[in-house]
């Protein structure tokens, strides 16, 4: 746990600048309507938190990393930011209509985090998880992503969002409802080169592993964008997976 939080604390500023936000269509699926009591768990630098607030929801942000909480407070001065984890939020029972996890469910023990989400939710409330992944139905993206994962022999493209194996929540929830949203994000080529440095496997790698990954990524980008002028932007394809579980 400490190790994981540490890896994000190190990458906080880069993470905010380099990682994509979430498309409107995904937020529509996650949090339809307005005025719900939402707990955004593993809120990080607040990428989803601010979209939920902009839609008029009352949002409490739970985040274990002190560095991330500081960034979040600076970015969103009005937001209630609380220390805690998905397994133990410290929030009152029956106080939420929606519990969201954006790119953070996989850091939890899903059994315990599910029981905690069910405790927080009012009857009929929803636990929602969301992931942005590179869209592995696009060949150049697969090539670049394979380079990013070059230190992991077992890596395979995941054309359906690649999140099928994430743990199902404990607690009293109905069956999962899944939707995929495909979209593109306009990213400076120089930033795409750096995105890998916000990934936990890179942050936790040895100096030699990091150097090898940087080299592979450079080679892959050169294969596809060799003639790109300096400072050019590219349309990076993403697939956002939105999973929802209604509390029984
Ligand atoms: C990949 S970041 C996602 C941040 C943000 N939700 C977003 O969409 O950009 C994952 C976050 O999960 C947090 N985290 C790590 N372990 C956690 C746990 N057990 N419970 C809740 N959050 C956790 C990390 O500190 C980090 O801020």
Image: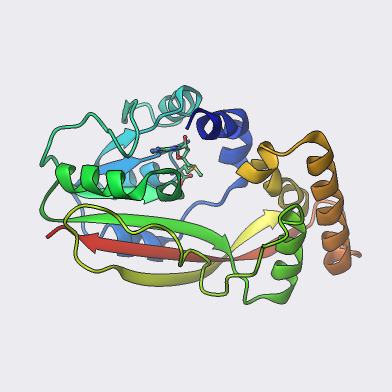
Which residue occupies 34% across, 63% down?
243
- Place of residue 157 in the rendered image (x, y in percent of width and height, measured from the top left): 64, 70
| Residue nearer the viewer, 35 or 41 | 41
Depicted 136 relative to depicted 34: above or below: below
Residue 57 in sight = no
Tell me the quarter of the picture where residue 94 sits: top left
**Residue drawn 43% across and 71% down?**
180
Residue 193 in the image: x percent, y percent? Answer: 76, 50
- Quadrant housing the C terminus: bottom left
Residue beneath the point at 45% across and 67% down: 164
The residue under the point 44% across, 65% down is 241
Q: How many marks?
A: 0
Q: Is residue 25 left or right of residue 159?
A: left
- Give the quadrant of ligand 1: top left
Q: Position of residue 29 (x, y in %)?
A: 31, 65
Q: Is residue 162 left or right of residue 201?
A: left
Q: Nearer the viewer, residue 67 or 170?
A: 170
**Looking at this view, is 133 or 205 the one in front?**
205
Q: Position of residue 182 (x, y in %)?
A: 51, 71
* Front residue (pair 127, 106): 106
Q: Is residue 238 above or below residue 188?
A: below
Residue 159 appears in which quarter of the rendering?
A: bottom right
């Amino acid at each position: 746990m400490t190790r994981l939080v540490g890896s994000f604390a190190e990458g906080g500023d880069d993470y905010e600048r380099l990682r994509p936000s979430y498309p409107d269509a995904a937020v529509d699926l996650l949090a339809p309507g307005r005025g719900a009591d939402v707990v955004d768990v593993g809120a990080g630098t607040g990428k989803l938190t601010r979209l939920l607030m902009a839609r008029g929801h009352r949002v409490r942000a739970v985040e274990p990393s002190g560095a991330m909480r500081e960034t979040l407070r600076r970015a969103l001065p009005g937001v209630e930011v609380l220390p805690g984890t998905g397994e133990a939020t410290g929030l009152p029972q029956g106080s939420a209509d929606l519990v969201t996890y954006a790119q953070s469910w996989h850091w939890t023990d899903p059994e315990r985090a599910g029981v905690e989400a069910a405790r927080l939710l009012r009857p009929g409330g929803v636990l929602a998880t969301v992931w942005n992944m590179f869209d592995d139905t696009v060949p150049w993206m697969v090539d670049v992503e394979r380079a990013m994962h070059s230190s992991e022999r077992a890596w395979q493209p995941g054309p359906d969002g690649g999140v099928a194996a994430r743990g199902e929540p404990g607690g009293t929830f109905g069956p999962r409802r899944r939707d995929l949203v495909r979209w593109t994000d306009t990213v400076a080529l120089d930033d795409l080169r750096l995105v890998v440095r916000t990934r936990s496997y890179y942050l936790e790698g040895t100096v030699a592993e990091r150097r090898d990954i940087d080299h592979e990524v450079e080679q892959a980008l050169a294969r596809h964008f060799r003639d790109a002028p300096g400072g050019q932007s590219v349309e990076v394809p993403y697939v956002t997976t939105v999973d929802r579980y209604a509390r029984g």
